[in-house]
Image (tube, grey):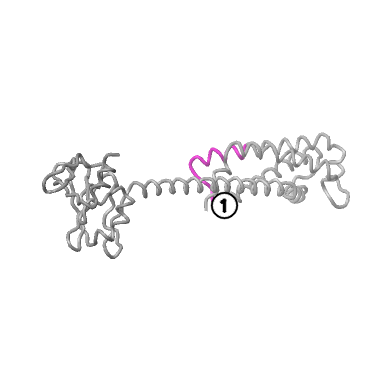
Amino acid sequence: MRISEQYYHIKNNILFCIAVPLFIMMFIVIYQPLFYGEANALQLGWQQHISFCLPVVCAIVLVVLGLSRTLLCVAMVRHSLSRREWTLWQICEWVVGSLFVDLFLSLFLHLGFFALLPQLLVTGFSLVVIPYVCYWLAIELIDRDLRLRQSESLVDELRRGVERNESGMVRFADEKGNVKLVVGADRVISLESAGNYVTICYDDEGKLVRYSLRNTLKAMEGLAGTSGLVRCHRSYFINLSHVRTLRRTPQGIYAEIGHAGVDDIPVSKSYASDLIRLFGS
């Protein structure tokens, strides 16, 4: 599992590089002495020269962390670390930092390098574990909040898409409820009943298409009503946006459709008044 990008974000790492030396300095100043146990050369030398050693140790930690995090940010351009690799990187930082601090103290206090190393590794770990854990918790919290906001944004976008889709599309299903055709509501021209079948006439980018499925107009009445289709005959529903004129003839009223290849659709007397009112509005 790869770590979050927040772990190698430049701003986060700069804050971390500054926070760790400051934490070490405050911790050592508050909880003297640094090295516990019976008095020894390291403890005595440290207490005598703490005003000089402490800033140098913090500076060494700052330089090591700065170089490590710079290398990390450069390396992450091509390769994202796994959590195991990230943990090993932190351990390497702690070990390398302890080695350089050991080198400085051994030279300054005239003590053995390898004699100091075990105590410095233990002390270094006890000092950095708190800021490292705090950094890990802070990054995980930031990443969680970021992913939560992204998820909420995606859900809102999907919801808006569904709402647009629901309001702009018509799903025609057969008598078993299986959706067979999905068409934009503004493209549907008419529905015509033919026995146990319904023929859907619609415009497909300028091409007239007729699609038949096994169902009844009565079963589709609710769907047609919510999709802007109006019943004009016991065998027809029409989309008023495609009606060019309503023409009265001796045989009755007909809706003339403004699309080549579509015959005039009859309008029953029982639906004529409502249809004329809607068409006029």
Q: Is residue 136 left or right of residue 43?
A: left
The magenta segment is: 67-82
For numbered disc 1, what is the local secondary structure? helix
Number of residue marks:
1
As rendered, which of 215 and 240 lies closer to the eye? 240
Amino acid type assigned to the residue bearing label 1 in the image: Arg
Is residue 64 visible to the viewer in this orientation of the structure?
no
- Name the spot of residue 121 as percent of width and height, x first: 73, 49
Q: Is residue 91 left or right of residue 244?
A: right
Mark 1 packing: few (<14 Cα in 10 Å), some, or many (20+)?
few
Q: Is residue 224 magenta?
A: no
- Name the spot of residue 105 as percent of width and height, x first: 78, 40
Q: Is residue 44 left or right of residue 150?
A: right
What residue occupies the far bottom of the structure in this picture? 176
Q: Residue at x 68, y 47 (%)?
A: 134
Q: Residue at x 70, y 45 (%)?
A: 131
Is residue 190 visible to the viewer in this orientation of the structure?
yes
Quarter of the C terminus within the rendering:
top left
Q: Is residue 279 left or right of residue 72?
A: left
Location of residue 15 (image quadrant): top right
As rendered, which of 280 and 11 lies closer to the eye? 280
Location of residue 8 (image quadrant): top right
> What residue does disc 1 label?
83
- Name the spot of residue 47 as percent of width and height, x first: 86, 41
As rendered, which of 12 and 196 lies closer to the eye? 196
Q: Is residue 198 above or below residue 27?
A: below
- Name the spot of residue 268 as percent of width and height, x first: 20, 52
What residue occupies the far left of the structure in this picture? 250
Q: Is residue 72 magenta?
A: yes
